[in-house]
Image: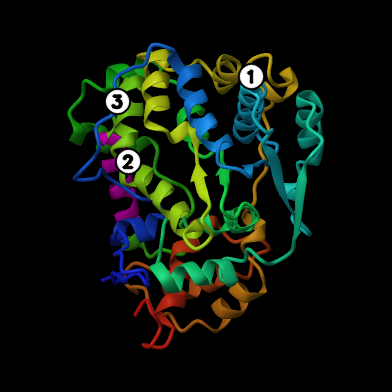
Amino acid sequence: MLLREPSSASGRMTPQLDGDELLANLMLGTRKVVEPLPAACAGGLRAALQTVLIRALCRPPCLVSFSGGRDSSAVLALATDTARRHGLALPVPVTMRFDGVPAAEESGWQQLVLDHLGLRNHEVLELTDELDALGPAATRLLLAHGVRWPANAHMHRPIIELARGGTVLTGIGGDELFSTGRSVRQLMAGCLPRRVLEEIWLARRRPTGYRWLTPLGFARVCRALAREEASWPRRWDRAVRHWHTTRAFAAMNDTLALVAEDTGTQVLSPFMDPQVLVELARLGGVRGFPSRTVAMRRLCGGLLPEALIGRRTKATFGGALWGEATRRFMSAWDGGGVDPRYVDVRRVRAEFEKAEPDFRTILLVHRAWLDAQPPSSPSR
């Protein structure tokens, strides 16, 4: 067994991560029970988004997790426009800035968006190692609910605390929806049997990295990812609907709710709202949007600066995860909590001698740390 199912301190059982998911650092497959998506609405995408945003704005304080990237900027722009149209209090953008993590620096893009929107109330949280992968926010979640995916969900905790009793809006889901469209070649591939698609994926698109896995572990991950890829519809609109049925979709929402559960804060991600998904699927059609820039322009053209809509760069926040607490634990780690048939403990330790370890090790780190806790811990 790679992973033992922990019980929640709140009496809930966390969805079990299976061995493939732990090794791949991904939630895979679909849920057994899924609420059906609603019918399309008369007002289309803007009306669907507005419904979510009004719900958030009517539960103040309404804060927007704002990095300066395209997805969080789109949510901020749409929420600001909705507030002005309906005479509601403006949303407050909240930005986390990390000392010593240059890849997360976005202040120029942030100011460009804020000036364009005419927003003056901007909260900035200056952070150092508070959001370490084994820092207080992360380990609180681990002890209460076990190993969760996405493993960096705890990074929203400072904004959630600031919004106590109110609402936090996020741009989560934008990457999954707007990163790619579907080419004719991809659509034709959908006619092939699933087993053939798996073999094609293994031959052409085997993942790179995963250096800390044994050959057996790497082969297991490759096969799991090939099965996952082959299970998705080739049509973009059907893929959007399929995404709603996945374990990953549910986990994104559920884990953020657990991060916020003791604060009275509601976390809403408009791009993951079921009605919004229906309207996006209808708008994108068979092949989806030609590019992320086109998608952004359809969503919020005129509300954001054109330079932001078309930007090609993206900040990364992985450096904020690998602080002293994680490195200290991993340097002394004895290999507990993982299966040596699949995980090479020596190579995992070597990964943590790097300035920025691979993010895909984080579930293994969480599993190892939780395994090392005394039996009296709530999760054991």
Q: Is 339 contained in the magenta span?
A: no
Q: Earlier in the sequence, mark 1 or mark 3?
A: 3
Q: Residues within 10 Å of mark 3 (few under 14, many from 20)?
A: few
Whole-percent x, y for residue 90 in the image = 69, 33
Q: Which of the pair 245/57 is nearer the observer?
A: 57
Query: Label 2, label 3: how many angstroms apart (C-alpha)?
Result: 36 Å
Query: Label 1, label 3: how many angstroms apart (C-alpha)?
Result: 26 Å
Residue bearing the label numbered 2 = 202
Q: Disc 1 or disc 3, which is closer to the eye?
A: 1
Q: Residue furthest top?
A: 42
Residue bearing the label numbered 1 = 85
Q: Earlier in the sequence, mark 1 or mark 2?
A: 1
Q: Residues within 10 Å of mark 2 (few under 14, many from 20)?
A: some
Q: Is residue 38 left or right of residue 312?
A: left
Residue bearing the label numbered 3 = 38
Query: Range of the magenta residues?
Result: 218-231
**Amino acid on which the number 3 mark rests in the picture:** Pro
Q: Is residue 241 above or below residue 136?
A: above
Q: Earlier in the sequence, mark 2 or mark 3?
A: 3
Picture quadrant of residue 380: bottom left
